[in-house]
Amino acid sequence: MMNQNQPPSDGRHDDDSALADFLASLMDYTPTIPDELVEHYVAKSGFQCPDVRLIRLVAVATQKFISEVATDALQQCKARQSAAVKDKRDKQQKDKRLILTMEDLSKALHEYGVNVKRQEYFADSPSAGIDPASREE
């Protein structure tokens, strides 16, 4: 027979204590993204919170998102470069550096619902696109 004074153990108490422990641990944690930067963007979106634990929770979530996007972009880059090596089997690729391109990043962000579009006009230098006769020398 169940004791009527004792509430049933449904795991809520465990979840609440785990959440409380996690929030308390955020006070000692210094995230990669500074609190001031998170506070700025949170305030810019219209939300103000004096609790530093919540600000750090947003910073940790943002850091995780950036890490996942960077990892996915790295996988896109590796796949692109391995496809390029297969196309050019004659030449041995001496340069093993991985170069993050906008194409890799936009594919990775697209998986998370973020669509990145290139600008219609992109200049490599401030003087690109200016008539050579009108450039200041």
Image: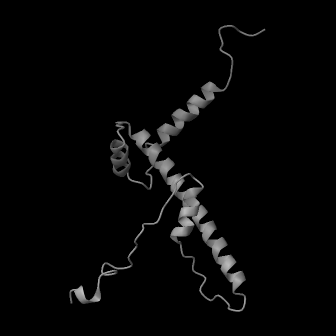
44 vs 32: above or below: above
Residue plotted at (66% across, 26% down): 11
| Residue 129 found in image quarter | bottom left
In the image, 103: left or right of 126?
Answer: right
Q: Quadrant of the C terminus?
A: bottom left
Residue 61: % across, % down: 50, 47
Q: Is residue 23 visible?
A: yes
Q: Quadrant of the N terminus?
A: top right
In the image, 69: left or right of 37?
Answer: right
Q: Nearer the viewer, residue 22 or 89?
A: 89
Q: Is residue 28 visible?
A: no
Residue 69: % across, % down: 55, 59
The colour scheme used to paint the residues is: one colour
**How many discs mark residues in the rendered view?**
0
Q: Nearer the viewer, residue 99 or 36?
A: 99
Q: Give the farthest residue toward the right.
A: 1
Residue plotted at (54% across, 63% down): 106
| Residue 86 found in image quarter | bottom right
Residue plotted at (39% across, 79% down): 124
Residue 121: % across, % down: 40, 71
101 vs 93: above or below: above
110 vs 35: above or below: below
Residue 100: % across, % down: 53, 72
3 vs 56: above or below: above
Q: Nearer the viewer, residue 12 or 73?
A: 73
Q: Nearer the viewer, residue 40 or 108?
A: 108
